[in-house]
Image: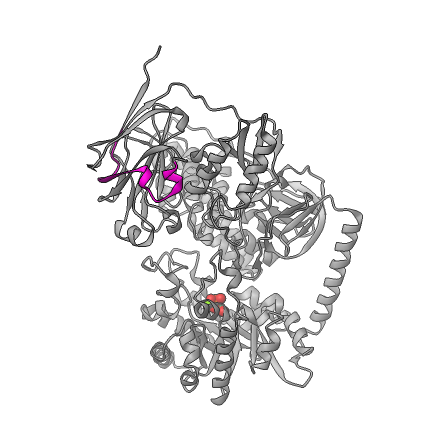
Amino acid sequence: MTEPMRLELKAPLSGVVVPLDDVPDPVFAGRMVGDGVSIDPVTASLTAPCDGRVVLIHSAAHAVTLASPQGVEILMHVGLDTVQLKGRGFTARVRAGDDVRAGDVLIDFDADYVATHARSLMTQVVVTPPERVAAIRSATGVVSAGVDTILSVTLKNGGAATAPATRAAVRSEPLVVSNASGLHARPAAVLASRAKQFTADLRLRRGGNEVNARSVVGIMGLEIAHGDRIEIVGSGPDADEAVRSLSQLIRDGLGEQAAAPPSGEAPSAQVVRPSRSEDPNVLAGVAASPGLAIGHVRQVRHEALRVVEHASDARVERRALDAALEHAKADLDALHARLQQEGAGDKAAIFAAHRELLDDPDLLEVAGDAVSRGKSAAFGWQLACTRHADRLATLKNELLAARANDVRDVGRRVLEKLTGVDVDPVSYEAGTILVAEELTPSEMASLDRAQVLGVCTTTGGASSHVAILARSLEIPLVAGIDPLALDLPDGTPVILDGAGGAMRVKPSTVEVDDVQQRQRDQSRERRAQHAQAHEPATTLDGHRIEVEANIGGLTDAEQAVALGADAVGLFRTEFLFLHRATAPTDEEQRAAYRDVARALGRGRRLVVRTLDVGGDKPLPYLALPREDNPFLGERGVRVTLNRPELLRAQLRAILLAAREGRVAVMFPMIASLDEWRAARDLLESERRKVDVPPIEAGIMIEVPSAALLADRFAAEVDFFSIGTNDLTQYTLAMDRGHPRLAPHVDGLSPAVLRLVDQTARAARQHRRRTAVCGGLAADPQAIPLLVGFGIDELSVSVPAIPAVKAQIRRL
Ligand code: PEP
Ligand code: MG
C-alpha cells in the first residue's frame, strides 16, 4: 500500500480565516468548485501557497490557479463578484505557464478600490478536483502570509483524467453565452457541478478547444466571453439527457441573470450580434461590413511556419533579425506610399501603425533577450509577438483587443522573411467567399474584389482593422461566425449576409432566387438614389435641408463629394492622432486639413472638429491618467484645454487650411460657457499669430448641460452641431457601449428629443444654424422628427448620403 500524499498550503494573504460555509456565495459555500477555506485579508499581495506552475490567470486578474507537483490544482479567487471589475484594481504578477515558489507574489490588488467596488474582499482558496481530496483541515483565527499553514490536505492517489471524447456521440446545437461576464468562476462551477451528476463523458467546446465539462479550471481556462458560441459534446450511457440538461442550464444563464447580446456603434456600420439561429443551415455571427453575396466557400488556412528554437551564433541571429525587420519596414513603407497615392489615407494609417510596431521597444527587447539566450531570431521574434498579442487580446477594451491581430500580422510578415517562406499573394476563383479563423489587415487589403465577394471569420468584431478595411473596400464581412464554418468543404455554395451577420449554407434555388431579387431591388433603389444624389434635399413643401458628411480623412472627403454631400458637417480628426507613437507635426496636420479642404472645393463648407480623445480612447504620447469613469472624466475639449499647446497647434493648422476653402472649427464635449470661452480665446489668439481672417466657430451639443443652456451659448457661438450619440448616453446615464444597456441607449427617447428641440429653438432665436451629426441624423425614423424640429443640417456617414436625401424629398 502506498502512503497517502499530503499537501501543506501556506496562507497566501494575512488575515482572518473564515470557513467556506460562512462565505456569502453559494458556489463557494456549497463547495461546487472544491473544498478549502476563505481569508478576510489585511494584506494586498496574493502569494503562492506552495511551489507550482500557474495554470491560469484570469484576464480580469482576480483569480489564479496553480498546479501543485502532487497533481492537484489550487484555485484562489480574490473577493466576491470581482470579475465584474474587469481587472480594475488588480495587477497580475505572473503569467500562465510560469513556475513559482511558495511565497512568490501572484497578484497585487488595490484593497481600498476592490473593497469599495466589489461585494467583499473575502478570498477563497480551494483545492480541486474534489475527487482527489481525501481529507482537508484548515487553520482558524488569524494567519500570516507565507508563514502559517492555512490548509493541510490529504490526497487520494491516482485520479487520471478521463480520456477526451474522440467521437461525439451526442452534440448540442451551438449555445450563445448570455452571462454578462462570460463563464467566470461562478457559472463555471454551476456547469461543472451539474455535469458531475451524470456518468457520461462530457466536454465543453469553444472553437477548436475542448475541456472536461466537470473541470471548473478547464472551463475558466477557455475564457468564454459574453456572446461566445459553445457546444456540449457527450458520450456514454446518459449522454443524451446530460447534453440536454447542460444546454438548458447554459441557456438559462447558469444561475445568473442573462445579459442582452453585446452591441454598439462601429465607425460606419451597426454592430449586430443576431440571436442564435434556429436553422442549422444558417451560421450566425457579427455584422461587420454590409452587403449580400452569393458564392462558394474557400477556406483560408495559414501555413504554419517552421521555426527552429536554438541557434549557435547569437551575432548571426541578431543580424538576421535586423535584416528581416528592415526588409519588412521597406515593404510596409511601399504599401503605405501606394495607399497614400491612391488617396486612401485612413487605410495607409493602418500600415503606418504596423511600421511603428517594428520599432516597438517591448517587442525588440523580448526578441533580443531570447537571441542572447541562444534562441534563433525567428524563435525570439515569434515569442515576442505572441506574448504581446496574447496580452492585448485579453484586454476588455474591444478596440485594443482587436489590435492583437495587427501584432500577429506584422509578426508573421517578419517571420516569413526569417524562415524564407514565399509570400506571393494568393489568387482565388471568381465568386469566392473566404472563410478563416482570422484574416490579417494585410490579407484584407490585398484582396481582389473581382475574385472575392465576401469574407467570414470566426474571430474579430466590427471595430477591428480588418472590419474597417472591409467596409472601405465594400466587401461584406461577418465576424465572429459560428466555428462550424471552418468545417465547410471548399466549394460549398453559400449566401453571405453582411448586414444581417449570417451565412446560409447550401441555399435552395428558391433562396438564391430570392437573394438575387433582393440584390436587384437594392441596386435599383441605390441607382435611383445615386442618380439624384447631387440634387438638393428639399421637402415636398420646399424646405431645404443640407445633407452633409461625417468623415475621417481624405478618401471619405472625396467619396462624400462623389455621393452628393452638400458639405462636411463633421471631420473627426482623431485618425491623425491615433495609432502612432508621437503627435502629428504641425506640417502633417496642416497638410491633412488643407488636402480635405481642397477636395471639397470652395463651394462646400468643412467643419473640423478638434481632437476628441481621452479616457476610453488613450493616446500613447499623452499621459492621461487611468480613470474610474472615463466617459465622465478628461475627454474631448477637456483634454485639449488642459494641454493648450496641443490645441493651439491644431487650431493653427485649421486656420491655415481656411485659406484653401470654407473652413469652420467645432469643439467637442463642451459642458460649460467657461470651456467654450477658453477655447474661443485660444482660437482668436492663434488667429492673430497666423494672421488670417476670422473663421466660424461652433460647439457640439452632446452634454445635457450644453443643451439646457443653449440660449446662452447661442448668443456667443456661430453654430451648433448636436452629437446625439453622446447626448443620448449622458442624458439617459447609459454607457453607449454597455453590453446590457446598449439596446436601450435610444436617441428617440423623449428626453433626448426634447433637448434637441430646445437646442434648435434657442439657435433660431439667435439666427444660428443647428446641425445633427450623431447617428440619429441617418435614422429613417428620426429624420421626419428632426426636420420637424427645424434642424437645418443632417451630417451622416458618407454611404448614407443618397438615401437620406431621397427620404427628405418624400417628406
Ligand atoms: C456624437 O457624439 O454624436 C458624435 C457625433 O461624436 P462621436 O460619435 O465622434 O463621439
Ligand atoms: Mg461625441
Which corner quadrant of the image does residue 563 belong to? bottom right
Q: Residue at x 66, y 81 (%)?
A: 538
Where residue 393 appears, x then y in whole percent? Answer: 45, 45
Q: Nearer the viewer, residue 548 or 503?
A: 503
Q: Left or right: where does residue 790 sit relative to residue 525?
A: left
Asked if 109 appears above or below 301 in the picture, the reply is below
Q: Nearer the viewer, residue 41 or 28?
A: 28
Task: Say whether residue 454 is magenta.
Answer: no
Asked if 172 appears above or below 615 in the picture, the reply is above
The C terminus lies in which quarter of the figure? bottom right
The N terminus lies in which quarter of the figure? top left
Asked if 655 appears above or below 23 in the picture, the reply is below
Q: Left or right: where does residue 286 sit relative to residue 415?
A: right
Q: Which residues are magenta?
A: 9-30
Residue at the outermost front position: 21
Where residue 748 appears, x then y in whole percent? Answer: 55, 71
Q: Residue at x 63, y 43 (%)?
A: 435
Where residue 583 appears, x then y in whole percent? Answer: 38, 61
Task: Say whether residue 24 is magenta.
Answer: yes
Residue 614 can be seen in this image = no
Q: Nearer the viewer, residue 315 or 117?
A: 117
Asked which colour scheme the image uses, the reply is: one colour
Q: Left or right: where does residue 647 sit relative to residue 435?
A: left
Residue 406 can be seen in this image = yes
**How many labels, in total?**
0
Where residue 412 appears, x then y in whole percent? Answer: 50, 40
Which corner quadrant of the image does residue 221 belong to? top left
Q: Nearer the viewer, residue 614 or 640?
A: 614
Q: Residue at x 50, y 49 (%)?
A: 332
Residue at the outermost top position: 1
